[in-house]
Image (cartoon, grey):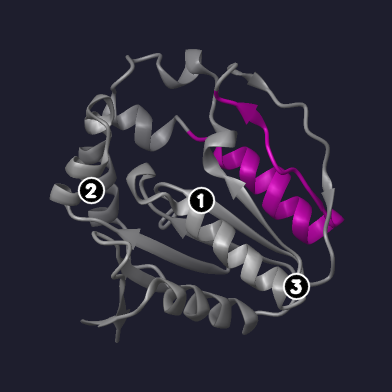
Amino acid sequence: MRYRPLSPDGLVEACVDAVDELPGRRVVAVDGPDAADPVALAETIALRLRVGGRAADVVDLHHWLRPASTRMEWGRTDAESYRTVWFDLAAIGREVIDGLRSTGEWLPRLWDPQRDRSFRDVPSPAGPDQVVLLAGPMLVGSALDIDLTVALRMTAGALRRRTPEDGHWTIAPLLAHEDETGPADIEVRWDHPDRPAVRVA
């Protein structure tokens, strides 16, 4: 595979163009470790979509954490728990994706990670061309029914440089997950966010 360098704005435009090819209510994943700040890219894409006249909102995966008692049952730094237990993907599938497609209402947030309790949010109505961008780690290869995937890929060295020391234990499970899953629809080299590069088949 070859990679084509893009400006950050060019990457956003490429993602917007790919979303625009998918009419109707759609779910897009912006997959990336916390060090890549996938939420920021998802927010920029959503803003560009809204400027173009399409309803678009971001769902931060960290607002769909399971309770701390569940996440940390096997310790605060258990790699397998991080991959399989931390995020409530079943709730996202039910409350966001199924809600968007079946009832036309979807839940923006479920869990407040600071207070470790429910947000008690209310569902949001979806327009006929609503786009919901899920942003967070390990979304590619999940069981979620996603229409388009964007992956921000970082090497181990870049992850170590940009991850706070108390989060270094997440690097191994993040890299293991990437190794065990297939590529995203849009694969992005993200070691240098000011100089991204996109995979070209």
Q: Position of residue 2 (x, y in %)?
A: 21, 83
User: Residue 136 location in percent, x, y?
Assistant: 47, 47
Residue named by callout 1? 39
Residue ID for mark 3? 54
**Eyeballing the image, is 196 above or below 153?**
below
**Residue that appears at 44% across and 30% down:** 85
- Whether the magenta-drawn stretch holds residue 112 is answered as yes
- What is the secondary structure assignment of the residue under circle 1? helix
Q: What residue do we see at 72% from left, 69% from top?
A: 50
Q: Position of residue 128 (x, y in %)?
A: 84, 70
Q: Which residues are magenta?
A: 87-113
Residue at the left extreme, as displayed: 157
Residue at position x 57%, y 66% in the image? 45
Q: Is residue 182 left or right of residue 116?
A: left
How much space separates mark 3 and mark 2, taking CA atoms?
A: 34 Å
Amino acid type at circle 3 is Arg
Q: Is residue 144 visible?
A: no
Asked if disc 1 and disc 3 are in contact, CB closer than 8 Å, the reply is no
> Residue 32: horizontal and vertical position, in percent?
38, 52
Secondary structure beneath dot 2 equals helix
Q: Quadrant of the C terminus?
A: bottom left
Q: Residues within 10 Å of mark 2 (few under 14, many from 20)?
A: some
Q: Which badge, 3 or 2, comes first in the chain's sequence?
A: 3
Q: Which mark is residue 153?
A: none
